[in-house]
Image (spheres, helix red, strand yellow):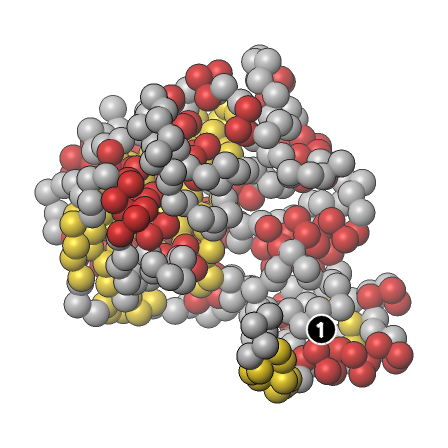
């Protein structure tokens, strides 16, 4: 099977770099990246700087448009669809009649993926999302992931998923994300997996079990998912665990224990001879100390109810002998979540550099040094994937494609 990829919500190219690192012949035939409301499309321009535009691939499809206005039939055929997209409200408005019978809320990017699947029918898909997808929304736990699974089931896909903490498998960041692998049941892989038990797929024979071995798992829970997306949206709730499998409308899920590997510590990725601009000035030290410290603040709600907002203290500075915490898009701002470290040369407190942020995600140094403002370099890295995790999954997808005819 030809190794062709379509990359939606491409950012600065994390999925592409992850697969290109395999050097096994993957061809990205189309990508889309567009930041709503942004006057300058920095992530798209960074992607193009490294890889060129899709017009260079002999087609006239624009990649830097709102995906909602893109004619999905115009996207080139591909065998692997990849996408990292926001965790949003995936409920449906089933009072609206469309040709497909359902219509999701405007602006929710899952429905753009769904429309692409309807139009192009790729054999395989790899998606990435924040792990809270499995538990959202708070008032109907598991509904949003249930909507996704029902859509995929209706399109004849089976699904494997795993919440992966990158640091537990040798990366430099404790970034926890859910990866979702969907495959057409009529593929060789699909037919092979249909003969196995759910436990075998989750624990040893599935894509994530092979890429990220486990030690053990709890008892597997099982449930049938409703046939109707509307019913899932209105009524479905289920406690999805950190690993699972869905096929023919049956969901299997369990909590697994990872076979952890030696992580990369923050010390291993930091630079020497860092510019003075990254150091914390004395006049801001008290503010940083306050943000990182424990708090108990009395507040009043809109209804007049008084309550206490509490949060515990954080390590300050961040320890260099451990992997970094999850990097957010707010990295480098005066913010509780921003990393602050002791400089290796001087011992003074400072922020991470853009290069260090790139290293946390597995990009080459200065990947985002393409003319974008420094603040956007951090923002793009906060949105990015941990590339070594993608590459590990890609190695197993390589094996899967070799067996397809």
Number of disc labels: 1
Decide if residue 155 is on the left or right side of residue 309: left
Q: Secondary structure at mark 1?
A: strand
Where is the N terminus found, in terms of image quarters? top left
Decide if residue 201 is on the left or right side of residue 302: left
Q: Residues within 10 Å of mark 1 (few under 14, many from 20)?
A: many
On the question of residue 183 being in view, the answer is yes
Residue 222 picture quarter: bottom left
Q: Nearer the viewer, residue 333 or 29?
A: 333
Q: On the image, numbered disc 1 is attached to which residue?
A: 340
In the image, residue 254 sits, relative to residue 87, either above or below, namely below
In the image, residue 56 sits, relative to residue 147, either above or below, namely above
Decide if residue 291 is on the left or right side of residue 123: right
What is the x, y in percent for residue 90?
Answer: 41, 45
Name which residue lies at 53% across and 28% down: 68
What is the x, y in percent for residue 241?
Answer: 30, 62
Q: Nearer the viewer, residue 222 or 405?
A: 222
What is the x, y in percent for residue 207?
Answer: 30, 48
Name which residue lies at 27% across and 66% down: 255
Q: Residue furthest front?
A: 303
Name which residue lies at 66% across and 48% down: 380
Where is the C terminus found, in terms of image quarters? top left
On the question of residue 314 being in view, the answer is no
Name which residue lies at 12% across and 51% down: 197
Decide if residue 5 is on the left or right side of residue 398: right
Q: Nearer the viewer, residue 113 or 168?
A: 113
């Amino acid at each position: 099977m030809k190794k062709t990829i379509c990359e939606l919500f491409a950012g600065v190219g994390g999925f592409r770099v992850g697969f290109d690192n395999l050097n096994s012949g993957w061809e990205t035939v189309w990508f889309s990246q567009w930041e709503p409301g942004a006057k300058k499309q920095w992530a798209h321009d960074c992607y193009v700087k490294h890889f060129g535009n899709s017009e260079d691939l002999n087609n006239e499809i624009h990649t830097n448009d709102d995906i909602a206005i893109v004619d999905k039939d115009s996207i080139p055929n591909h065998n692997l669809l990849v996408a990292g997209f926001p965790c949003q409200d995936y409920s449906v408005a089933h009072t609206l009649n469309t040709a497909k019978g359902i219509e999701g809320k405007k602006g929710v990017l899952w429905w753009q993926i769904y429309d692409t699947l309807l139009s192009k029918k790729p054999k395989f898909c790899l998606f990435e999302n924040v792990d809270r997808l499995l538990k959202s929304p708070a008032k109907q736990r598991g509904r949003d992931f249930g909507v996704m699974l029902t859509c995929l089931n209706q399109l004849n896909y089976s699904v494997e998923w795993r919440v992966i903490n990158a640091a537990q498998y040798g990366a430099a960041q404790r970034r926890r994300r859910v990866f979702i692998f969907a495959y057409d049941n009529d593929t060789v892989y699909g037919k092979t997996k249909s003969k196995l038990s759910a436990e075998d797929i989750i624990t040893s024979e599935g894509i994530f079990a092979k890429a990220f071995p486990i030690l053990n798992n709890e008892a597997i829970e099982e449930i049938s998912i409703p046939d109707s997306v509307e019913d899932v949206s209105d009524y479905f709730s289920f406690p999805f665990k950190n690993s699972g499998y869905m096929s023919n409308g049956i969901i299997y899920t369990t909590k697994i224990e990872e076979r952890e590997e030696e992580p990369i510590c923050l010390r291993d990725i930091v630079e020497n001879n860092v510019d003075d601009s990254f150091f914390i000035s004395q006049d801001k030290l008290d503010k940083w100390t306050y943000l990182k410290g424990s708090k108990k603040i009395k507040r009043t709600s809109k209804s007049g109810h008084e309550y206490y907002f509490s949060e515990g203290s954080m390590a300050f500075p961040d320890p260099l002998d451990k992997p970094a915490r999850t990097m957010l898009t707010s990295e480098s701002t005066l913010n509780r979540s921003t990393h602050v470290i002791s400089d290796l040369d001087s011992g003074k407190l400072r922020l991470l550099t853009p290069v260090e942020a790139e290293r946390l995600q597995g990009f080459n140094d200065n990947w985002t040094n393409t003319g974008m403002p420094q603040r956007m370099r951090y923002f793009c890295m906060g949105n990015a994937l941990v590339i070594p995790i993608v590459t590990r999954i890609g190695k197993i997808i390589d094996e899967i494609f070799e067996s397809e005819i």
